[in-house]
Amino acid sequence: MAQRKLAALENQSLRRALAETERKSVGRARRDRQELISFCCNDYLGLSQHPDVKRAAAQAIEELGVGAGASRLVTGNHPLYRDLENQLARLKGTEAALVFGSGYLANLGIPPVLAGKNDLIIADDLSHASMRAGIQASTAESRFFAHNDVEDCRTILENERNRFDHCLIMTEGVFSMDGDRAPLVELCDLADAHDAWIMTDDAHGLGVLGGGRGSAVEAGVADRIPLQMGTLSKAVGAYGGFICASRAVIDLLVNRARSLIYATGLPPSAVASSCAALDIISSNEALVGLPLARASQFTRELNLPGPESSIVPIIVGDAETALSASKQLAQEGFLVTAIRPPTVPDKTARLRFTFAATHSEDDVFRLTAAVKKIGLLP
Ligand SMILES: Cc1ncc(COP(=O)(O)O)c(C=O)c1O
């Protein structure tokens, strides 16, 4: 049975495999004995390799060991969590914050607690798989609006909001595969008008937009989004997920979020390195501005529309073309993974370029030359 399913994936160019990849220095990767400049990593600020961040992790291991040993509600709530949650709440301007084992676990655990029977969840159709997992785990009814289509969201609210007790609108601050931003001001207006909660997943905004504080700050609505979720695994360079919200919401999640309660706490090293990385993010505006500057250089040189984030996709359509383009770029010395369905909708397979502070202008210049050479753009 497994063989048959794998063969079907292979036939559609949709079979995936884990490719061994070393990331020893920032912005570079080694795969198949080849040294490549990586343009497909979410370590937007290179903090996974920053000496202060690595030192914080090493010190935490020395002092507290390598694992948390239990769920945070048993004995896994080591003292570093307090510092990290205070730091996150300060950065996002909320009363409190709660750290989960990963961004996926946060998104899986939060919606079922905040929306249940007689409630409605309305989410962007391109919401990340982890948000969909959380929506599926909730007993609330769910609807999806066309990507970034405020009018579609409004229509759902006007037609259906009255039938439900509570309503939760969910979107990404920056969409992970498209790099565009959600219309946060308009969605906040809708949430206000229809007595709905709004939750953003800002996995790709933190450390890049709003002076590093994320897409809500960039859009000027930080105080209007009561549920701000994010991850410590991308620009922060470490591992873990979180939500910033009111103290009451955080306390309720501690009591009810199954992916927090029934999972082991993060290793102390992940928490300590996140603290050190957030210190850098909140104090180094020049560094934080670099990913978008590099993405802008890329789009300018290729005459593409300006970027809204550090992510720029080039959509090629079918999976086979995307795989072949990725291979050709590897031959030119660049690592850019092909993104295929079901991660993206059918017929929108793409190369997803991500730009980081660790790329030089010359790296980007050479990448654009390679993109032109392989004829990726019409
Ligand atoms: C938008 C979005 N949300 C959530 C996640 C999950 O975060 P993590 O990798 O920390 O589990 C990701 C990463 O894949 C993401 O892109």
Image (spheres, rainbow, N blue to C red):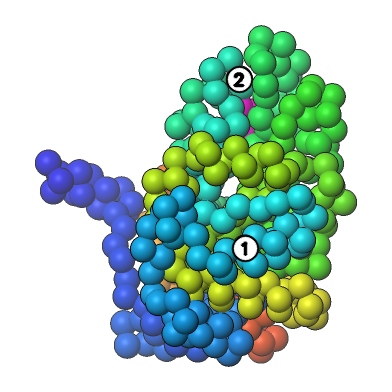
Question: 173 or 66, which lies in front?
Answer: 66
* On-image quarter of the C terminus: bottom right
Can residue 231 be seen by looking at this rendering? yes
What number of labels is visible? 2
| Prevailing secondary structure class for the magenta stretch in the rendered image | strand
- Percent x, y for residue 216? 78, 52
Report the side of 341 relative to 53 (left or right): left
Q: Which residue is mark 1?
A: 82
Can residue 372 be seen by looking at this rendering? no
Which range of residues does the magenta coloring cover? 121-125
**Where, by quadrant of the figure, is residue 330 drawn?**
bottom left
- Percent x, y for residue 268? 48, 71
Looking at the image, which residue is at 60% across and 52% down?
98
Q: Is residue 321 above or below residue 127?
A: below
What amino acid is at disc 1? Answer: Arg
Report the side of 9 relative to 196 (left or right): left
Q: Is residue 170 above or below residue 311?
A: above
Looking at the image, which residue is at 13% across and 48% down?
3
Q: Is residue 124 magenta?
A: yes
- Percent x, y for residue 367? 59, 80
Report the side of 235 relative to 94 (left or right): left
What amino acid is at disc 2? Answer: Asp
Q: Mark 2: which secondary structure? A: loop
Question: 362 or 235, which lies in front?
Answer: 235
**Where, by quadrant of the figure, is residue 327 drawn?**
bottom left
In whole angstroms, how far apart are the C-alphas of marks 2 and 1?
A: 32 Å
* On-image quarter of the N terminus: top left
Q: Is residue 191 above or below residue 311?
A: above
* Marking on residue 119: 2
Q: Nearer the viewer, mark 2 or mark 1?
A: 1
Looking at the image, which residue is at 33% across and 51% down?
14
Q: Is residue 170 magenta?
A: no
